[in-house]
Image (spheres, helix red, strand yellow):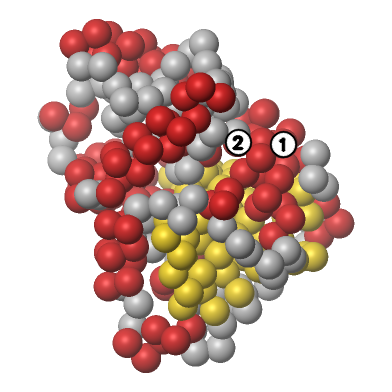
Amino acid sequence: MVFLDLEAKEVTDKTVSSKKQAVKKAFETPEWYLDGTRENITIRTETVQEFLEGGKFDHILDIACGDATASTPLLTRSNRLTLLDISSGMLVHAQSKIPANLQSNVEIINEDFMKATLEPKSFDLIICLGMLAHVDSPAAVIAKIASLLRPNGTIIMESTDAGNVMSYLTIFHQKLASIRKPVPYHVNLLTRAEVVKMFGNHGIELCSIFRYTFSLFPGIHRVLDQKALYKVVRGMFGSSKKNRNAWLGKECIYLFRPAKAAGESVS
């Protein structure tokens, strides 16, 4: 688990390059992440499906796609999917999930999102799960995402709410752990309100949110395996359709749409 730095929401210019390199190195051999957080990935994927409720989308962008578990189920013969990740190792896993008969409908980009050349207003669904903590400027990332969205498009974003009570417990535990084992880089701390405001600056409003905490207590993963943790989380927090105990949920999965379309159903 990556250390959260309470005092640094953005890295300085001096550390930008090294942070990018550290992020790429950390996820280049991704098995530790994919195997160690599989049930959490499942919760994210199920939430994406719940938010979209079978909606159809012509062109989907999955930023920091990982193994593309969340987006490949949305791929059909009649749409296109762009998978983007800084880790070539992640993209190997992602490509293995693409059905052979749909390979031509998928574009794979192994690049930093902020450097990638993508056509403005070309995506009607953009998925970005778990990336904001690891970028140089969350505001710049959100601005670019907003520029790529078609009118009436949909954005599904995930980030950790640094203002949640459960986050403070995690931060304290990670600070203690970092004394013994220094971390390669510090992640960005963003509150739920800050994420919503940054999207609002681009005329994009929050439509729905699912809040949960996967590791309720430090070290719980040593007692319960992934499947057991999944059952505990579902039992305590429910789903996006009926979110229980949301005040204890530090992980936020957001559904955003342009303001004029925020009240409309996803289609």
- In the rendered image, the quadrant that contains the N terminus is top left
Which mark sits nearer the N-terminus, 1 or 2? 2
Seen at 50% across and 30% down, the residue is: 16
> Where on the picture, by quarter, is residue 3?
top left
Q: Nearer the viewer, residue 40 or 263?
A: 40
Vertical position of residue 44 compared to residue 54: above or below: above
Vertical position of residue 198 compared to residue 42: above or below: above
Seen at 79% across and 45% down, the residue is: 202
Q: Nearer the viewer, residue 71 or 230?
A: 71
1 and 2 marks in contact (CB < 8 Å): yes
Amino acid type, label 1: Met
Of badges 1 and 2, nearer the viewer stands 2
- 88 left or right, relative to 253: left
Q: Position of residue 98 (x, y in %)?
A: 35, 77
Vertical position of residue 17 compared to residue 5: above or below: below
Q: Is residue 206 visible?
A: no
Seen at 45% across and 43% down, the residue is: 130
According to the picture, the residue beneath numbered tag 2 turns out to be 138
Q: Circle 1: is it few (<14), some (14-19), or many (20+) Cα within 10 Å?
A: some
Amino acid type, label 2: Pro
According to the picture, the residue beneath numbered tag 1 turns out to be 198
Q: Is residue 180 visible?
A: yes
Q: Nearer the viewer, residue 75 or 243?
A: 75
